[in-house]
Image (cartoon, rainbow, N blue to C red):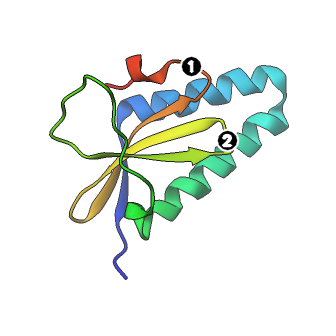
Amino acid sequence: MNNYNIEWSNKAREDLFNHFSFLLNVSYEAASNFVTLMKEEIVSLSQLPQRYPIFEMNNIISTIEFRKMVVDKRYIVIYAVYKTSVKIYRILDSRKKFETLVG
């Protein structure tokens, strides 16, 4: 089984930080648990990243085949699988109209 390297876009890092900061206002434990869970789930993409569905966005044409992983029923990780790596593009809150946020 191939192991893929995990790469993060600047926007994905910013998303992770913003969600963490928001949850930090609720409680340190919630923020810490969020980051731990998100990192564990993203690291799991290093094996079988194709197990999640292709993410199709209406009216958006892309040469990249994005995939979508749902974490904790609330967050959507948008990523792409390349030859030897998985690139994390965004971490979005599923309660928002995220189609406008991808990019």
> Looking at the picture, does residue 20 appear above or below residue 88?
above
Residue 10: x percent and y percent? 37, 32
**SS assignment at label 2:** loop
> Looking at the image, do the residues carrying marks 1 and 2 touch, with CB atoms under 8 Å apart?
no
Place residue 6 in its image quadrant. Answer: bottom left
Residue at the spot 83% in from the left edge and 38% down from the top edge = 29
> Looking at the picture, does residue 76 appear above or below residue 25?
below
Q: Quadrant of the N terminus?
A: bottom left
**SS assignment at label 1:** loop
59 left or right of 33 in image:
left
Residue at the spot 35% in from the left edge and 62% down from the top edge = 5
87 left or right of 41 in image:
left
Q: Residues within 10 Å of mark 1 (few under 14, many from 20)?
A: few
Question: Looking at numbered disc 1 in the image, what kind of residue is underneath it?
Answer: Lys
Report the front residue among 3 and 79. Answer: 79
38 left or right of 82 in image:
right
Q: Spatial distance from mark 1 to mark 2, Cα to Cα?
A: 13 Å
Residue at the spot 23% in from the left edge and 57% down from the top edge = 82
Q: Quadrant of the C terminus?
A: top left
Residue 74: x percent and y percent? 65, 35
Question: Looking at numbered disc 2 in the image, what kind of residue is underneath it?
Answer: Lys
Q: Residues within 10 Å of mark 2 (few under 14, many from 20)?
A: few
Report the front residue among 84 and 55. Answer: 55
Residue furthest to the front: 58
Residue at the spot 67% in from the left edge and 41% down from the top edge = 73
Q: Which residue is mark 2?
A: 73
Place residue 70 in its image quadrant. Answer: top right
Lower sequence index among marks 1 and 2: 2
Residue 85: x percent and y percent? 29, 60
> Which label belongs to residue 96?
1
Report the front residue among 7 and 61. Answer: 61
Residue 72: x percent and y percent? 68, 45
